[in-house]
Image (cartoon, rainbow, N blue to C red):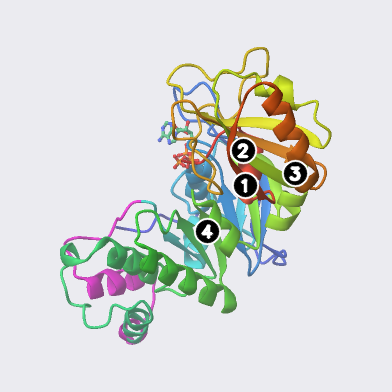
Amino acid sequence: MAAPQERTAPSDSAVKNAAVSIESLVKSYPGRSSNAVDGLSLEVRQGEVFGLLGPNGAGKSTTIGILTTRVIPTSGTARVFDVDVVSHPVAARRLLGVVPQVNNLDRALNAWQNLTFHAAYHGVPRSLRKAKAAQLMESFGLSGRDRDDIATYSGGMAQRLLIARALMHDPRMLFLDEPTTGLDPQSRLFVWDRIRELRAAGVTIVLTTHDMDEAAELSDRVGIIDHGRLLALGTVDELTHGLEGRSILDLTIGRVDLPAHDILSGVEGVESIEKIESGNSGPPGNPGGDPPPWGQSPPAATAPPAAESNQTRLRLYLSRDPALVLGPVAQTLAKHDCPITRVQIGEPSLEDVFISLTGRSLR
Ligand SMILES: Nc1ncnc2c1ncn2[C@@H]1O[C@H](COP(=O)(O)OP(=O)(O)OP(=O)(O)O)[C@@H](O)[C@H]1O
């Protein structure tokens, strides 16, 4: 594939203290009524792992597509290390590596060739390519399989090869689009370790993931987007502490017909209530209350779903110690002849922040 022509050389202006700088970015796809990216502005700092989170269709891949020069924005600016990705795509591509959501390894080439051809495309001198490929094969646990047809690679091996390939030209930053989706636990931990090593080596990383544990585990900061707009930006601690109510009571109750919101919102210390999932196949039982924001969501990772057909799972956000609230909550429910079948106390997680902002779970 021939590299597109640069219009002009990138400017020598002082490099800003940002690895990624996006300002008022808009992407409108033809025939779509709403913008995929809708006035997005954010910065990714040099050397950080930045988690870009959002529900399906939030605009994450489009944003990454713009930053990695595969998608042309409708308006706004996007820079990588102060290089405008629209006017200087070739210069931008030298600075970044991309691990796409979908395996796009070249099946006509063996693993070794996938690495060395990529390096050649990015202008890595021939004398360096072999050593670099051998080093990356080794660190990604693929030594000995380098001349194999990639059709013989497992999903985990292919994913490791994709990351190795993206690093062949020593990019200053790496875009990882759902890097561990579909991987077994060992492969997932292996990829996490490599991400940590890259960060320690000073590589800036932008990560999209549907796995909240992964985002919380790896990210220095996260940005949550939906409908192409930024909803929140900060460290995981900043975001979870900013959530209304500092503690959570996760309850499963043995009724589906109870207006739990009306009944429990008067209990002292209960700031807000969300219905996570009802075992009912019909509409969630919340007469008179707000529509359940989690009505279509699978359960949060912190507790199992209310699996039985007569069970309702509620999440209560609290402004005081859960131990003080649990008693009054249990008494209130008992007055309505409603048993509690399961209780879990916890602090808000990144998934709680995500759900409170977007109103639905990632998966
Ligand atoms: N090539 C395209 N043509 C038309 N619409 C598109 C195209 N690519 C994406 N979209 C739409 O733009 C919106 C944002 O999509 P995008 O893939 O960027 O979201 P996402 O957050 O990456 O989603 P996911 O988590 O499912 O990958 C969606 O409504 C999607 O249907």
Ranked by sequence position, the earlier of labels 4 and 1 is: 4
Q: Residue 189: which quarter of the image?
A: bottom left
Q: Is residue 211 above or below residue 337?
A: below
Queried on whether the Cβ of the residue with tag 4 lies below 8 angstroms from ligand 1, the answer reads no
Q: Is residue 282 magenta?
A: no
Residue placed under numbered mark 3 in the picture: 243
Find the distance from the CA under tag 4 to the CA under tag 2.
Answer: 25 Å
Q: Which residues are magenta?
A: 102-130
Residue 81 placement: quadrant:
bottom right
Residue beneath disc 2:
251
The label on residue 27 is: none
- Cα–Cα span, label 4 and label 3: 20 Å
The quarter of the picture where the N terminus appears is bottom left
Q: Which residue is mark 4?
A: 214
**Quarter assignment of residue 188:** bottom left
Would residue 359 be seen by someone viewing this image from the given angle?
yes
Q: Considering the numbered disc 3 on the image, is that residue within a helix, a strand or a loop?
A: loop
> Which residue is situated farthest in the top direction here?
288
Q: What kind of residue is marked 4?
A: Glu
First along the sequence among labels 4 and 3: 4
| 232, 243: nearer the viewer | 243
Q: Nearer the viewer, mark 3 or mark 1?
A: 1
In the rendering, at what x and y percent does residue 191 appear? 43, 68
- Kind of element beneath mark 1: strand
Ligand 1 within 8 angstroms of badge 1 C-beta: no
Mark drawn on residue 344: 1
